[in-house]
Amino acid sequence: MGKPLIPGKTIYRLSIYHRCLRRLTENAMETVSSSALAKAAGVNPSQLRRDLGYLGTFGTRGLGYPIGELSDAIREVLGREHLQPVILVGVGNLGAALLRYQGFQKEGFEVIAAFDAVPDAVVTRGIEVPVHDVDLMRDFITQNEVKLAVLSVPVEHAQEVTNELVEAGIQGILSFSPTVLMVPETVTVISVDLALELEQVSFFVKRDGEPAPEVPEDKIVP
């Protein structure tokens, strides 16, 4: 029997658990109870135990989970034994801000290169990641066996660039281009539409004289 297929929502929560465990490790803690870890991650203990059940048997009643062992198991499932290489396409204002973000490596990812249609015009102040011409993107992906890409190009170019990424071998795309991208079933696309997310948040803001709308369960994280 092979390992059970882990649902996408569980994978998302495992990432949160891994982040919490790393912070506990930084505080020199060696064990953590299910209730304490669940509270730190913002879930209930039963949900935590169901999620961790996909990893095997961990923890001892009355003693809690061994943080190092549990962290290693989650990291293995998430493929974080080594930094995963990522490329970014589209170094405009948003793309440049993403390149300056220092948190990717803490989560197991390394942006090893960026690509833009006019790399010489890119303002690279504060950016250490090399920026190449987009014409070099396909060869770079193949030569470096990159499987993940961040997309922050104008919406009118998003599908064209996506097609090139897929043809080059990219299997996962985090898209900040506000459009629906068509990809094969073997490719995963996660879209982040900042304006749409802000619109969703604004709906739940209490208006003067009105009760705040109830937040549906699928909007509660996680």
Image: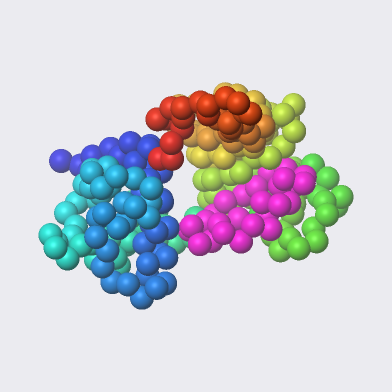
Write down the quadrant of residue 30 in the picture. bottom left
Would residue 199 be seen by someone viewing this image from the given angle?
no
Write down the quadrant of residue 64 in the picture. bottom left
Residue 23 in the image: state x and y as whole percent: 42, 65
Q: Residue sitting at 64 percent across and 57 percent down?
A: 101
Report the side of 92 relative to 102 (left or right).
Answer: right
Residue 108 falls within the magenta-colored stretch: yes
The span shown in magenta is 85-111
Would residue 43 be seen by someone viewing this image from the given angle?
yes
Closer-to-camera residue (209/67): 209
Q: Residue sitting at 73 percent across and 51 percent down?
A: 96
- In the rendered image, the residue lying farthest to the left is 61
Report the side of 36 relative to 213 (left or right).
Answer: left
Residue 51 falls within the magenta-colored stretch: no
Q: Residue sitting at 53 percent across and 33 percent down?
A: 189
Write down the quadrant of residue 68 in the picture. bottom left
